[in-house]
Image: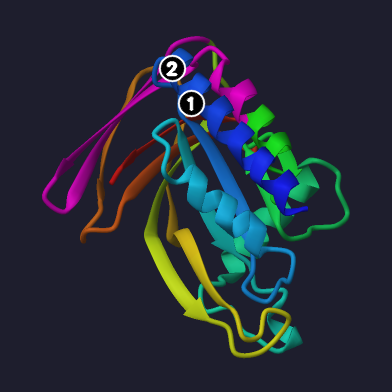
Amino acid sequence: MLRILATAAALLTALTASVSAQSEGRVVLVELYTSQGCYSCPPADKLLGELAERDDVIPLALHVDYWDYIGWKDIFAKPAHTQRQRAYAKTWNERMIYTPQMVVGGLHPVVGSRPMDVAELIQKHAMAEPVVALELTRSGDSVAIVATALSDVPAAEVHLVRYTPEQTVDIKRGENRGKRLTYHNIVTSWQTLATWDAAAPLELTAEAAGDAPVVVIVQAEGYGMVLSAAQLR
């Protein structure tokens, strides 16, 4: 099993390296729905950490709260993350949600501990034609955002996300009791800034105080395709 996981991880690295060389700056958003109380989540958490080292992927860990009842309360969990995952499931006509689940590009759900499946989806999205050009510029405690449609695109929402790059936690109870686990790109806030009809370029400024990285996501309304994503670390 360890050899299989190592091979899959190597394939993921090779595929994403190839994508980075060929995608000319196309960045893929990967959302991981995870929990400190989930026994099967650590491999997906580790995989997200590997993705965080790449420049062609923006991986975000959204810790959910529905595992808290089994003995360990996830210190990063937010009800809003669970609500976002449920909204995706409703969009896809799925009745159940689970962890670890990754969502690639807002469109494709995948088990987060399957590196080869994740790599294939990242490659698919990275090779797609860009539809929105997105530029971010930091000035003090604010970020200027400029988005321009490169083709016909649907109405979209513009989101601003902040995250903690890395934190290690000692799990004292629950399914992962006794483990010391390191988490990456832990989402701490998620704010919807505006809606955009793409008829004209979007220009806005948002508050972004502090040193935490800033991610801006342009996503089709109704939990649709991620049209563009960019970050300032």
- Kindly report the distance in space between the C-alpha atoms of the residues bearing marks 2 and 1: 6 Å
On the question of residue 111 being in view, the answer is no
User: Where in the figure is residue 211, as x and y percent of width and height?
Assistant: 22, 58
Taking depth in this image into account, of 151 and 183 the one nearest to the observer is 183
Which residue lies at the image location 16% right of the left edge and 54% below the top edge? 141
The numbered mark at residue 17 is 1
Query: Circle 2 — which element?
Result: helix
| 80 relative to 54 in the view: left or right | right
Residue 166 left/right relative to 65: left
The residue at the point 74 percent across, 45 percent down is: 4
Quadrant location of residue 99? bottom right
Q: From the viewer's perspective, is residue 104 above or below residue 193?
A: above
The x, y position of residue 224, in whole percent, is 65, 34
Q: Helix or strand or loop: what does disc 1 sit on?
A: helix
Residue 216: percent from the left, percent from the top? Answer: 39, 41
Under mark 1, the amino acid is: Ala
User: Which residue in the rendered view is the most extreme toward the front?
Assistant: 3
Relative to the observer, which residue lies in front, 216 or 180?
180
Q: Residue at x 79, y 48 (%)?
A: 90
Q: Residues within 10 Å of mark 1 (few under 14, many from 20)?
A: some
Which quadrant of the view contains residue 158? top left
Amino acid marked by disc 2:
Ala
Residue 108 is situated, as x and y percent measured from the top left of the image, at 71, 35
Query: Looking at the image, which is closer to me, 185 or 138?
Result: 185
User: Is residue 177 magenta-colored?
Assistant: no
User: Residue 21's mark?
Assistant: 2
Looking at the rendering, the stretch of residues picked out in magenta corresponds to 122-151
Residue at image position (44%, 11%) is 150
From this viewpoint, is residue 32 visible? Answer: yes
Whether residue 207 is situated above or below residue 177 in the rendered picture? above
Circles 2, 1 touching at the beta carbon (< 8 Å)? yes
Using the image, determine if residue 19 lies above or below residue 206: above
